[in-house]
Structures are given as C-alpha cells and as structure tokens.
C-alpha cells in the first residue's frame, strides 16, 4: 500500500555520496506535508534519522541530510561508511488516505 | 527517555484475533502524543496500522479499519492492538511507536514477530 516510491537499492564505495529519492503525489508530499526518514539496521526497529524534511535528531551524524521539493524528497549520505548499510524509509501524511504513509524502502550497500 | 516494549503471542491461528500490548516507560501515555502501531511483513516495507490518544480517540488505516481496534489503559501506561480475522498476510513484525507533533514517529519499540499459521 506504499504511496511513496523509493529506488529498491543504491550503493557506493566508502567515502562516496549517495542519494535516495522519495516520490509522492499531490495528496502527500505535494500537499506540503513534511517528509521524515528512518534508518533500519538489519534485525532492528526503524530509527528516526531526519524529521521535518531536513532536521537531524540529536546524535545523528551530519553526514545525513534531507531535502524536499514539490512532490519529492531526498536523503543524502556523504562520506559513506560501512555502518550505514541499512534499509531507509521515507514517511509522510496522506490526506486522501487520512493516514500516515511510508516509502517502499531503499537498501543501501557499501561496496 | 521514553521507551516502548511490545508483548503478546507470537503465533495466531487463521481467522483468529491478534492481540498485542505496548508498555510505555520513562514517560506518561497521557502526554500530548498519539501512540501508533506499525507492521512490517517479512522482507517488506512498513505499514501504519492506526493510532490512539490517551482520551481514547483513534484513527485507523482505511485498509485495515474493519478489523482493527486500538485501546488505551492509562492505569497501566500501555496501549493495545487487536486485529481480527487474521490470515497469513497478517504475518509481520509489529512495532509500537510514539507519534510526535509534526507527524513523525519516535521512539519505536523493538518489535514483536507474529506468525499466522495453523
């Protein structure tokens, strides 16, 4: 039931920069609802990574950054590290569904 | 800080009712937050199930609304999920999470796996 679309996977060498897109529609991201990002390490619960499009909770490295434009949002990871291997999910609110929606998820692989 | 812990049976029979509880510690369930359930089928993405406020007000995912009931027990500082008429498609890890003003979820419980099988 995911209404937010993400690429299934992205990869990069240590130290490189990778970006993950999150494409929505006029009833969610395009309707000015904020986008939030979660990191899910293997076998663990999701952890808030970015909130309110571009804000980092305390303790999240500044290698992680978020942005939003129109009906899409992006998560960038600079200076990629082995510990960044995880699944990443975007999340927003959808007015048509009257509920919260998640992206399809992106697996980040560090080569 | 606030911590969440899910509990409940790990195995439910088809057509039965899935029942889980989320215990809140380090904070009050009567704070200005909503409390949610999210699930993740094996190898798949996240799906929001529904939420409750300490007053008892609820909102549910339309795709699950006919089968979901979320309740709160303020005396025990916990909230619960019931999902009826379950099938194998309801097999998932179930997470509870606190909703923050601004529409994000933080923190999350560690999750509890539930398998629907006879």
Image (cartoon, coloured by chain):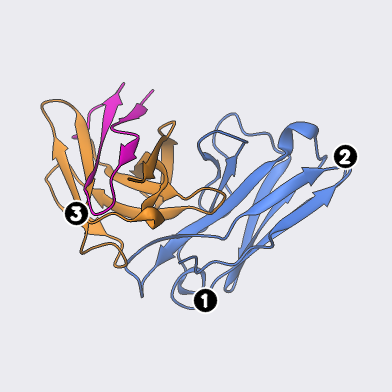
Of all chains, the one bearing label 2 is A
Q: Nearer the viewer, residue B78 or B114?
A: B114
Q: Which mark is residue B58?
A: 3
Report whether mark 1 lies on the same chain as mark 3.
no
Rendered location of residue A24, percent (x, y): 55, 71
Which residue lies under the disc numbered 2?
A: A15
Rendered location of residue B79, percent (x, y): 21, 37
The crowding category of the residue bearing disc 2, from other C-alpha atoms within 10 Å (few below 14, some 14 to 19, many at least 20), is few
Identified at 53% across, 54% down, the residue is B45
Q: Colour of chain A?
A: blue
The quarter of the image holding the N terminus of chain A is bottom left
Is residue B25 part of the magenta span, yes or no?
yes
Disc 1 on helix, strand or loop? loop
Disc 3 on helix, strand or loop? strand
Task: Name the residue at the front extreme.
Answer: B118
Q: Which residues lie in the magenta part? A: B1-30
Q: Nearer the viewer, residue B42 or A87?
A: B42
Colour orange maps to chain? B
């Amino acid at each position: 039931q995911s209404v937010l679309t993400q690429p299934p996977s992205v990869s990069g060498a240590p130290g490189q920069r990778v970006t993950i897109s999150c494409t929505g529609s006029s009833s969610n991201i395009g309707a000015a609802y904020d986008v939030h990002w979660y990191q899910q390490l293997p076998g663990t619960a999701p952890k808030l990574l970015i909130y309110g499009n571009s804000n980092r909770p305390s303790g999240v490295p500044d290698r992680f950054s978020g942005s939003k434009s129109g009906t899409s949002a992006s998560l960038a990871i600079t200076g990629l590290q082995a510990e960044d291997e995880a699944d990443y999910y975007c999340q927003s609110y959808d007015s048509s569904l009257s509920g919260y929606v998640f992206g399809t998820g992106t697996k980040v692989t560090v080569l | 800080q606030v911590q969440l812990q899910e509990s409940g049976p790990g195995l439910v029979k088809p057509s039965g009712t899935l029942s889980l509880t989320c215990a809140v510690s380090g904070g009050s369930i009567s704070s200005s937050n909503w409390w949610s359930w999210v699930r993740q089928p094996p190898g798949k993405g996240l799906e929001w199930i529904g939420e409750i406020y300490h007053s008892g007000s609820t909102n549910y995912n339309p795709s699950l609304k006919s089968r979901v009931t979320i309740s709160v027990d303020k005396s025990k500082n916990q909230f619960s999920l019931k999902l009826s008429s379950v099938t194998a498609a309801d097999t998932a890890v179930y997470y509870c999470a606190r909703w923050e003003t601004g529409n994000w979820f933080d923190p999350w419980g560690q999750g509890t796996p539930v398998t629907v099988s006879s």
